[in-house]
Image (spheres, rainbow, N blue to C red):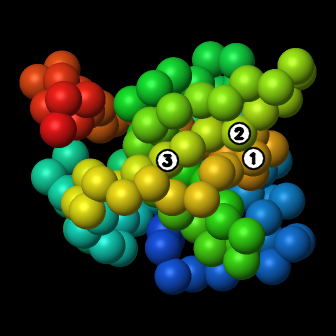
Amino acid sequence: MQKKPRSLEIKNLQYSIKEIAEIQRAIQIRPLPVTILTGSMHPVLKVNQIYSAAWRPATDIRRFDIVLYLDRDRTMICHYVWHINVVVDSGTLVTRPLLGRREDLPVDIKDIIGVIQDAKISLWRRVMLSVF
């Protein structure tokens, strides 16, 4: 009997290295459910809603994609891509929350867990974020 994937909870939750490896393996096979715990991406992502996160190659990640990643403390974070820094074959992303519009510390491509599949930042909001 196959175990149901557990829901990943984002923000303020730290994971062990073993748990991170398990999540990274599982998300490459199938999308995983992600429960949003904070309002940093409101109104695009709603608190306590469950969204689907899927693995995507780093070369396919684009500006304004909503990504799930690990910060330096192994805390799971879900913010949108503001800027992609490319250095030869690897690089970093600069992410932001929707609320506050501050830039996060650069995220190494290898720390990206997945991309939220069932929520997108609208064209109107993208323009507003780019202008202001």
- Residue 82 lies, with reference to residue 106, above or below; the image says above
Kind of residue at disc 1: Asp
On screen, 44 above or below 89? below
Residue topped by disc 1: 108
Instruction: Please report the residue visible at 62 percent of the width from the left and 17 percent of the height from the top.
Output: 60
**Labels 2 and 3 touching (C-beta < 8 A):** no
Left or right of 23 on screen, residue 84: left
Which residue type carries mark 3? Answer: Thr
**Residues packed near mark 3 inside 10 Å, few (<14), some (14 to 19) or many (20 plus):** many
Image coordinates for residue 104, horizontal then vertical, percent = 51, 58
Q: In what quadrant of the picture does the N terminus appear?
A: bottom right
Q: Which residue is mark 2?
A: 92
At x 55%, y 44%, the residue is: 94
Residues at discs 2 and 1 in contact (Cβ within 8 Å):
yes
Residues at marks 2 and 1, CA–CA distance in whole angstroms: 4 Å
Q: Is residue 95 visible?
A: yes
Residue holding disc 3: 95
Q: Residues within 10 Å of mark 1 (few under 14, many from 20)?
A: some
Q: Answer with the quarter of the image where residue 52 lies.
A: top left
State the CA–CA distance, disc 2 to disc 3: 10 Å
Q: Position of residue 59 (x, y in %)?
A: 70, 18
N-terminal of the two: label 2 or label 1? 2
Give SS at disc 2.
strand
Report the amino acid beneath label 2.
Thr
Position in image of residue 71 (x %, y %): 66, 65
Write the residue at 25% across / 62% down: 100
Is residue 33 something one can see in this rendering?
A: no
Taking depth in this image into account, of 6 and 71 the one nearest to the observer is: 71
Q: Quadrant of residue 2?
A: bottom right
Give above or below for 4 relative to 108: below
**Picture disc at residue 65:** none
